[in-house]
Image (tube, rainbow, N blue to C red):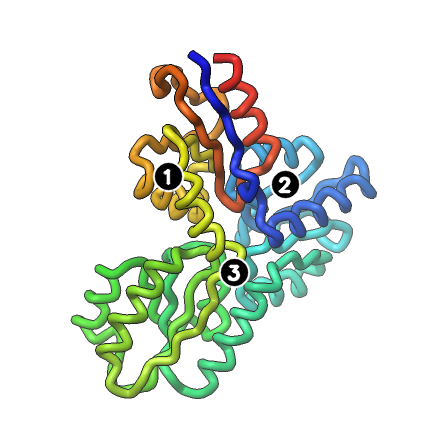
Amino acid sequence: MALTVEIDKRSGFCGGVIRAISRAEEFLDLNPGRKLYSLGAIVHNEAELSRLGAKGLVTVGKEDIPNIPDPSHETLLIRAHGEPPETYELASQVGINVIDCTCPVVLRLQKSIREAYASHGQIVIFGKIGHAEVMGLLGQVGGDAVVIENMDMLLAALEDGSINLDVPLEIFSQTTKSPTEYSEICSVLSEKARAGLTVHNTICSQVAFRHEELASFASSHDVILFVSGASSSNGKVLCDLCRTHNPRTMHISGPEEIDPAWFGPDDRVGICGATSTPRWLLEEVASKLRTL
């Protein structure tokens, strides 16, 4: 078997994740032996979490913050996804130091939602229910917004009246969602909105551009190995996109999951990943492939 192996040059951490991990590594390098508490997984990739855990990064939930020993001498990192206002209030109450790594794109989105809510329209959010970024967005408006994950949920919300078509509507998207799916949802909602719909273009431009590039990359290879953590929302969206353009798309978390039976002689194999997939992991997958 003479496989041709190519890593997608655009795959790897997005700017927000790079910033958060760099800040975490900087803290841990300057404070050897100390822990750094991350509120939620700093990145949805198990291999990268293991690497950072060995350096002293400890993932905690919001419920764990009051139980951190001697919090005034500890530091809490808020990851790129962002948090609702009550998280900052809790951190202040317990006296823990905060490194805020909320992605600037998410910060702008949070500000836009607050401003739209102040104009007394109804807020609709296209995003994954329970996702950290979406929870942070809901926190900006006290939970007073309708979250829809897909077209079926939109139609159901229109049917049961959860979305009030007689008031001005403003729709926002989670920054890592599919631009195509968002456009389709906005189109349907625009046709139904009797008092008008304002569409906010809040998908990260880096993510939006990746969709077009990744579709081309998937189409130009015989087999695609898509590398991402099992809990990565962006990974699921992008892997599904690859599979749409190349049915021989295999999702893996790391090189140990590669099955030689997936490949035929002289296959051209493309390796790509989510915005939460580290470049070093893509390189390890490529290295394993080249030994087949």
| Tag 2: amino acid | Val
Q: Which residue is mark 1?
A: 219
Check disc 2 and report its element: helix, strand or loop. strand
Counting from the top left corner in percent of width and height, residue 145 is at: 37, 72
Residue type at the position of mark 1: Ser
Q: Residue furthest left?
A: 159
Q: Residue 66, can we see it? A: no
Residue visible at 38% across and 80% down?
Answer: 198
Foreground label between 1 and 3: 1
Q: Nearer the viewer, residue 184 or 172?
A: 184
Q: Residue 262 appears at what percent x and percent y?
A: 35, 20
Does residue 197 lie above or below 228 as drawn?
below
CB of mark 1 within 8 Å of CB of mark 2? Answer: no
Rounded to the nearest angstrom, the CA distance separating label 3 from label 2 is 31 Å
Q: CA distance from mark 1 to mark 2?
A: 40 Å
Disc 1/disc 3 C-alpha distance (Å) = 22 Å
Q: Camera-side residue: 95 or 129? A: 129
The structure residue drawn at horizontal position 57% and vertical position 64%, both measured from the top left corner, is: 105
Looking at the image, residue 27 sits to the left or right of residue 106; the answer is right
Q: Is residue 212 left or right of residue 74?
A: left
Query: Which residue, given by chain and number where applicable, does mark 2 sit on?
Result: 58
Quarter placement of the N terminus: top left
Compared with residue 287, is residue 280 higher up or lower down, i.e. above or below? Answer: below
Which is more foreground, mark 3 or mark 2?
Answer: 3
Q: How crowded is the residue under tag 1: few (<14 C-alpha within 10 Å), some, or many (20+)?
A: some
The numbered disc on residue 205 is: 3
On screen, residue 20 versus residue 170, left or right, reads: right
